[in-house]
Image (spheres, grey):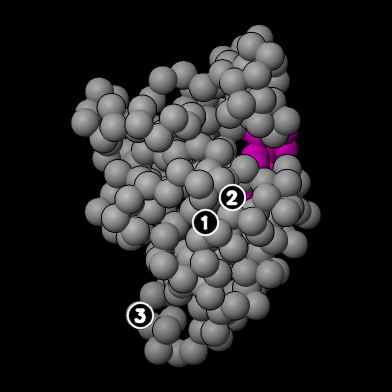
Amino acid sequence: MMSVRADLHVHTALSPCGDEEMSPPAIVDAALAAGLDMIAVCDHNSAGNASAVGEAAGGRLTVIAGMEITTVEEVHIVGLFPTTAAAANAADEVRRSLPPADGDYTRFFGEQYLMSADGTVYGREPHALALATVLRLDEAVALIKRFGGLVVAAHIDRPTFGVIAQLGFFPHEAGFDAVELSRHAPAGSPAAAACAAYRLPVVRSSDSHYLEDVGCVATDLTLEAPTYPELVLAVKHSRGRMIADA
């Protein structure tokens, strides 16, 4: 077994709220500088840059393909997928529920850059990734699971876009595999203590939109290797794999 330090919620410049410096090579460099062994690329309603970040890592860092879906209730949930192909297929379904990004949208929310592994911009995502999809919470959870993914209730301590903030309660029947504490909830805080009531594994992620935030908080995992199947075992607390207390 080995100790793996993971930041399982990192945005790229594809997210309209992400800084333009969040390119694949820059993210990898920032993650390595922060002492991370694993990251998950989770852009809003898209997985378009996940493969490029994985290629930029070149084996120096494990990159999980993810996506942060905004449900019709404006709840943010993170999907972590077994392969980039699974993430891309799930993202294709999500994308179809979004309107086009017109000029007014881009001026307000920002650009949505599709990038290659070396950081070159080769296109712009034409759909409005910052908006809510038409998927209900249960539909978004089912979509992630249909493509073999883990479902994480994103930043549940935040006053907006977390499942508790948006619904007013925690839906135990929703099918979450884990809950995520944001970087604003330090260890030992009331928000961290409250997570025990949800009876789910707790991860701490940066939700970074800027390079300086990558790895500012992280989740410590006990795994045999820094891989997706091992991450699944840790979430299930199975066969000696585990997630350290948040």
Circle 1 SS class: strand
Q: CA distance from mark 2 to mark 3?
A: 26 Å
Q: Which residue is mark 3?
A: 108
**What span is colored magenta in the figure?**
54-68
Q: At x 29% / y 32%, what residue is drawn?
A: 194
The image's mark for residue 68 is 1
Q: Earlier in the sequence, mark 2 or mark 3?
A: 2
Q: Which residue is mark 2?
A: 79
Decide: marks 2, 1 in contact (CB < 8 A)?
yes
Magenta residue check for 63: yes
Q: At x 55% / y 86%, what residue is drawn?
A: 100
Name the residue type under label 3: Phe
Circle 2 SS class: strand
Q: CA distance from mark 2 to mark 1?
A: 6 Å
In x, y percent, where is residue 173? Answer: 50, 47
- Dividing the image into 4 quarters, which one contains the N terminus? top right
Residue 216 image-quadrant placement: top left
In x, y percent, where is residue 119? Answer: 61, 57
Magenta residue check for 147: no
Q: Earlier in the sequence, mark 2 or mark 1?
A: 1
In x, y percent, where is residue 12? Answer: 52, 56
Name the residue type under label 2: Gly
